[in-house]
Amino acid sequence: MIRDIKGLHHVTSMAADANKNNRFFTDTLGLRRVKKTVNFDAPEVYHLYYGDEIGTPGSVMTYFPFGNMPRGRRGAGEVGITEFAVPKGSLKFWTDHLVSKGVPGLEAETTFGESRLHFAGPDGDSFALVESEARNREAWTGAGMTQDVGILGFNGARFRVRDAAATGELLTFMGYQKAETQGDISRYLIEGGNAADTIDVEQLASAAPVADQGAGSVHHIAFAVDDRAAQLRVREALMDTGYQVTPVIDRDYFWAIYFRTPGGILFEIATNEPGFDRDEDTAHLGEALKLPSRYEAHRAQIEQLLPPLTT
């Protein structure tokens, strides 16, 4: 069993419009844009990162805003819900706030004893706010949110798959422990890591359609390890078990490896080092366009292709 995974690192999704995406996360949800860079494989497309003050692993939602991308289709083999943790007693504020912003899809419920508020993002993204203990986390308050209501980071995520047992076996190998089951949803928790430690696995019918990625879909979900040595141990363990894992890839702010799960979801294992302040002062994170070194010579051309962000 793998013992190096510390919970979630980040979640990366896709969007149709960079400015709508940026406004939603920085204004509506009150997160900080901690990095403005580009897709390493498609430099004409932004890669935008949102999180707490410094982009702590376990707090960072990232997006590839492919212009005019059609919406994805929900189904089996996807991260069905991305869950943010908010302070206890704050869901009344969030309900009123999201209504005032015209956010659709609001639905309150209780799952596994947790108060939750579901809502949709600009591209039909599926989100939930989950009331949680702070657990040594602080919300970003630079966008006008206060500590008693602001988003603390991730609570976790819900996977939607046809074979929950196979996904559960993988999570168990990765260090998660099955906690309880409620209807078609099983909860897995990991101990000794960050507070973004919850994965729920929803069992869909065998005839459920396969998810088709597009705007509003999660591209991949990343799990955190402390450093490159831990990442190499995880990679070796996965490969010994038969998974096809990529070589280590330098993403400037973390190192990454990727593999596909039995349920079809793309997993990443990302290091907590070096962090988002490696090329920007903490006070100015996310302000300047940062490019991978191989694209720096093409900065002028790339900047002409990218739409200006209005906020």
Image (cartoon, grey):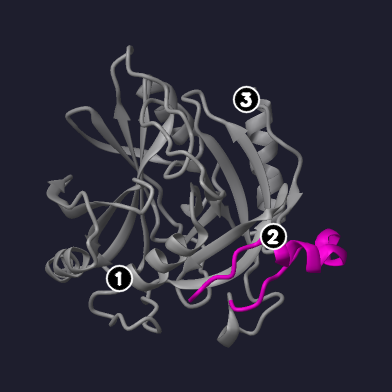
**Distance between the alpha carbons at the discs numbered 3 and 1:** 36 Å
Q: Which residue is the site of mark 2? A: 305
| Whether residue 192 is situated above or below residue 87 in the rendered picture | above
Residue at point 46%, 52% (across, down): 7
Q: Magenta segment, which residues? A: 287-311
**Mark 3 highlights which residue?**
241
Q: Nearer the viewer, residue 224 or 102?
A: 102
Q: Is residue 307 magenta?
A: yes
Residue type, label 2? Leu
Pair 2/3: label in front: 2
Q: What residue is shown with label 1?
A: 134
Kind of element beneath mark 3: loop
Q: Secondary structure at mark 2?
A: helix
Give SS at disc 1.
loop
User: Can you tell which of label 2 and label 1 is closer to the viewer?
Assistant: 2
Pick whichever of labels 3 and 1 is earlier in the sequence: 1
Q: Would residue 281 be counted in the magenta stretch?
A: no
Q: Nearer the viewer, mark 3 or mark 1?
A: 1
The tag earlier along the polypeptide, 2 or 3, is 3
| Residue 261 position in % (x across, y down) | 53, 29
Q: Residue at position x 63%, y 32% from top? A: 238
Specify few, some or many for label 1: CA neighbours under 10 Å numbering under 14, 14-19, or 20 or more: some
